[in-house]
Image: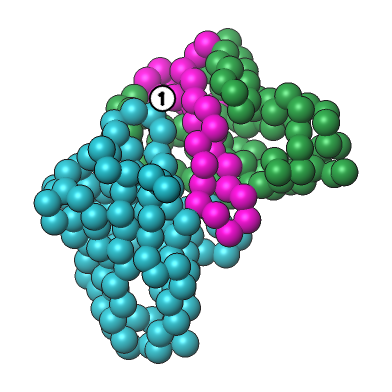
Amino acid sequence: DTGVSQNPRHKITKRGQNVTFRCDPISEHNRLYWYRQTLGQGPEFLTYFQNEAQLEKSRLLSDRFSAERPKGSFSTLEIQRTEQGDSAMYLCASSSGRAEQFFGPGTRLTVL
Amino acid sequence: DAKTTQPPSMDCAEGRAANLPCNHSTISGNEYVYWYRQIHSQGPQYIIHGLKNNETNEMASLIITEDRKSSTLILPHATLRDTAVYYCIVSGVNFGNEKLTFGTGTRLTIIP
């Protein structure tokens, strides 16, 4: 399968713990996006990379959140000191600079 | 990005055409109309996009009014697999370089 992959698919953690999610984009795509989706809402933009450069961050991305894309390939999203309000689906998407963004299946985070 | 307004839900009989409306009265001249859909528990999927001309691909047709203040997504022969939340998004001219601002979309239910 050559689509966008995300790992893990599900993560349950206790409040205050750190979690890290990984996204592997489609191999030739230089743009990578992270979104967050809560129940009943559409996805909300978090941050965007072009190659290894992080070009835009939403104000939703508090200082507890950090994203990286070393070498412009896979990306990681880390949440430190998780809170119950961080419970959501975290979606990754990639594109080649054309109109279409390809989304992965998401990582569902539950903070207890 | 310009805001969009969509009905929260719609039903359509299997085999009939599903027509999903979207209002985007504040769209600016360089903004495109994008449609994505999200099947339950999956990441969003690109359907189609357009600027001012009507567009058709293997999935759907997009009809944009002459004043560009509204559009309609048409699924010509709806199947049960088309049951999903459909998002109408207006975004800037840079293909793949703009974050997508999702609303709450239209929940389309295809009825057997």
- Position above or below: A83 against A49: below
Left or right of A68 in this view: B110:
right
Q: Position of residue B47 (x, y in %)?
A: 54, 32
For image coordinates 32% across by 88% down, the residue present is: A16
Q: Nearer the viewer, residue A30 or A57?
A: A30
Looking at the image, how many numbered discs can be counted on the residues?
A: 1
**Chain coloured green: which letter?**
B
Left or right of A38 in this view: A92:
left
- Position above or below: B87 against B93: below
Q: Nearer the viewer, residue A36 or A107?
A: A107
In terms of image quadrants, where is residue A51?
A: top left
The amino acid at mark 1 is: Glu
**Chain coloured cyan: which letter?**
A
What's drawn in magenta, residue-wise?
B25-53
Residue that mark 1 sits on: B31
- Position above or below: A49 against B96: below
For image coordinates 50% across by 14% down, the residue present is: B52
Q: Position of residue A96 (x, y in %)?
A: 29, 34
Q: Is residue B35 magenta?
A: yes
Categorize mark 1 by other alpha carbons within 10 Å: few (<14), some (14-19), many (20+): some
Q: Secondary structure at mark 1?
A: loop
Q: Position of residue A72 (x, y in %)?
A: 16, 48
Q: How is the image coloured?
A: by chain
Left or right of A97 in this view: B107:
right
Determine the chain carrying the residue at label 1: B
In terms of image quadrants, where is residue A21?
A: bottom left
Q: Is residue B73 visible to us here?
A: yes
Q: Nearer the viewer, residue A45 or A92?
A: A92
For image coordinates 31% across by 86% down, the residue present is: A17
